[in-house]
Image (cartoon, coloured by chain):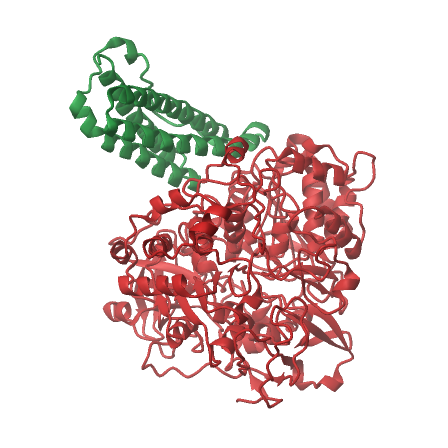
Chain colours: A red, B green
Amino acid sequence: MTDRIADIWGDRTPHPKGSVWPARVDLHLENGLGEADVDRWVQSACVLCSNGCGCDIAVKDGRMVGVRGRAGDVVNHGRLGPKGLYGSTPWASSADRLTRPLVRDGGDLVETDWETAMGRVVEVSKKLLDENGPLTHGFYTSGQMFIEEYYTLAVLGKAGLGTPHMDGNTRLCTATSAAAFKESFGADGQPGSYTDIEHCDAVFLYGHNMAETQTVLWARILDRTRAADPPTLVCVDPRRTPVADEAERTGGVHLAPRVGTNLALMNGLTRELFANGWVDDEWVAAHTLGVDDLREVVEPYTPEKVAEICGVSSGDLCRAAAIFGESENVLSTVLQGFYQSHQATASAVAVHNLHLLRGLIGRPGSGVLQMNGQPTAQNNRECGADGDLPGFRNWNNPAHVQQLADLWNVDPLTIPHWAPPTNAMQIFNYAEKGSIELLWISATNPAVSMPESARIRRILSGDQCFVVVQDLFLTETAQLADVVLPAAGWGEKTGTFTNVNRTVHLSEKAVEPPGEARSDLDIFLMYARAMGFTDLDGAPLPSWTNPEEAFDAWRSATAGRPVDYTGLSYDKLRGPSGIPWPVNDQAPQGTDRLYTDPVFPTDTDQCETYGHDLLTGGAVTEEEHRAMAPNGRAFLKGAPYTPAHEQPSEDYPLLYTTGRTVYQFHTRTKTARARSLHDAAPDAWVELSPTDAEGLGISEGDLVEVRSPRGKIEVRARIGRVMAGAVFAPFHYGSWDLDDIAPGQQHRQANELTMTVWDPVSKQPYFKTAACRVTKLESGDRPAPAPTTAASAPARGSSVPPTEGGEATTSQILETTPTYANDPAAGTAHPAPTGTISGRS
Amino acid sequence: MPHLSTYVALADRSEQTLAESFRAVAEGHAAEADIFHTCEMLARWSDGHRDRLAPVVSRYGEDDSITEPERLHASGLAEVRSGQIGLLRDLQDLHVLATLVQTTWTVVAQGAQGLRDRELLSIATSANAETSRQLSWLNTRMKAAAPQALIVDPKE
């Protein structure tokens, strides 16, 4: 019986390069139930990170009681991580679920019926439309709803109302991934595949603590690095993460650039490729544009200059560049350390540049995985709930807008395309001013997750904007709303979603939602009907009434676009699970990786954007784009490094960065309601380097104040493995808690300190570039509540008791590895390690 | 070359005006985070153009005594307007100033070519390219700001 709090990644199944990753089926059932006790298993995929692991939900007596990994699923080959195992189901039967709508009366939220609550929303909505039109309406969603719900919202927003003010919290987690793809390749779409792990010779992880954020993907990497022929890892991270340890173990490098200097580092790596002749000139000439400009941009970034800016030794930089330049196949992965930091898009694009310069794209082992933070973030991007047009269409291309107008049978001028879609930060800015007067927030908790949270609370609680919140619980955000709508969650509704590497899963309804809670799809449709949205012929808009019809409508919206779902159906998704798009007549079983030809969707009539100036965000015009005649070639784009917006000063001498822990997800709405996860990381903390702690007279467990020009937190200090000069705080902790240890308090909310500033191209807010100071408030009587198992581990030589004590799980390594469609190693399955039920603790 | 020095002076002056105006808009609309940071950065670009031009100015002499082109000198934004529509108008003013800067560099580049002054030509060409990027950002930001500013009644 495995304690997956203590053993995050589970047992190893090492296997040789080029062979299929063995299967291991992980299972957890609540309350000591056994598999024989389960009434039925319902097909789904996990939503507690972006990896998208296929799983089956265990149902007993009408309740979800656990999950089991699907052995045949292409994503996880049966495995699940600690969050998925422990956190997938307990929240659903939590006593504090929202079961009835609430409306604000005399300052208080009071229970009411759906008719009253929706009636109030519709009344405000119609009044605003009459007075000032659709630009008074804003929508802020999530990375956790389903395709059917995003697409329905996109249609009612773009064709029903006609507002450009629609975005998701995906702006906080994955916008840079999308923006970087668009700048380099012309359209969104993950080029690589998880199967690249089995074929690569080196893995570069940029600002990506995969060991904690995507534990199952990390297990997949460990099963290669612990084999006899491991790939070499390179880790770029200001913390000494498990990824950094593994990089060192495999003979690679850990580069810890000073917070806010990623682009200088990337420019240095790029320059090394040019300087050492590691550029495939022929490939570059045939398949890219812009190499001369890029060479000129990176020329000043000598190893010595990079060392000076980043605080990374020139030797380490050169060694990392050599690993990239000389390995036959390289896989790169990127996440928040780049996306939420200074010069985000330019840094993520620089990763593409490295691959393009060597032609390392579109073949097994050579790929890029720009990661997402959330399970369905990809669909928010695809469906246009992030403000973009559905199907990766270009808002600046009249032909693309006309396609949607034809599809929806509406006037093209209804569809907001006269300006770029409004990003989340700007939506809240308009709401602050009262120029957006109705803000509808679904399945997300901006009062905790957005930067400068005191400002966000002020915006949501003010009278200038009517706030509707749709959620599972009365979150910190819902408490500030004018109307609260109770939503059904995962397992309580049917729908589809797509993970980081384009893999689509069906998640079936397993149980009834509690009380009067309804699916997000039903809520959006209820609003659309009550508003009376119709197409040009007077037919209801959207035309569908249930998830499968919505999915079919979405499929037709993707025809002819890179994100092609036309070959998928609910029935097909019920087969061997996990099918990556594009799925169409040419690729009926889906597509493992893109750009094998390599032809990129950069043609002016095909592309999703004409591109931007990476430094200013200024848009390239259609004429300029056409003049470049990209015709399927990828763009090499560079930008010089500029210092971050807030530099350390005498008052605020340290750099402040926020992030995640393996046991919690986002603002903990689900994970903290699972006892095993809650207890593993029960409260907030801050990490200091031993050097800084000594200088400040701070010891492990001391209560400290961390202050920036915007606010402060008071939390316990972990003397940990963050680089000197930097301070790390997890962003998960708001005022809510399972044990009510902090009612109504913001004293531990990391975003009290962060800045309102965002990337010029992706508009992703920068959570990792503030300056701060740390002062000791009182001596501690116990260690900080930070886990010891991963990046928040104490510095060497410390005597903090280990994090452990998770409920029992089982894990079974299959002796016969199933067959996985599209797997380039198919037919090379290596005999799996022997042993079945594994136990460690 | 009786007028080249005048135009070199005009380039210097108009870049100075543009830089000051970018800074005024940055400060005046500091609550708009992207306006604040981007305008500060674009002001530094104009500063950089002037720094590079400085040796040429001393070589030719900065002659702004001739009255005719003097009328071309634009005055910058002394103070910013308020609200969303005010921001839109301020961006429009910056665009006008940047256009003057750009055409000035075009004219200076012509003169530099005639004189085979490679240093001046290089400065004028690269500054012109960066002015295009300033203009492109202003255009992009105006397009984004316009619908809300024009259509939705701002509450001041």
Residue A73 occupies quadrant = bottom right
User: Image check: A61 left or right of A185?
Assistant: right
Q: Give x and y (percent) for residue A231.
A: 45, 72
Q: Residue at x 37, y 24 (%)?
A: B102
Taking depth in this image into account, of B10 and A534 the one nearest to the observer is B10
Q: Is there any visible trace of residue A822 in the rendered image?
A: yes
Q: Quadrant of the N terminus of chain A?
A: bottom right
Above or below: residue A112 compared with residue A160: below
Taking depth in this image into account, of A740 and A510 the one nearest to the observer is A510
Above or below: residue A276 compared with residue A643: below
Residue A591 occupies quadrant = bottom right
Taking depth in this image into account, of B109 and A491 the one nearest to the observer is B109
Q: Residue at x 64, y 49 (%)?
A: A562
User: Image check: A249 left or right of A697?
Assistant: right
Above or below: residue A258 compared with residue B132: below
How many numbered discs, if any?
0
Q: Residue furthest front?
A: A282
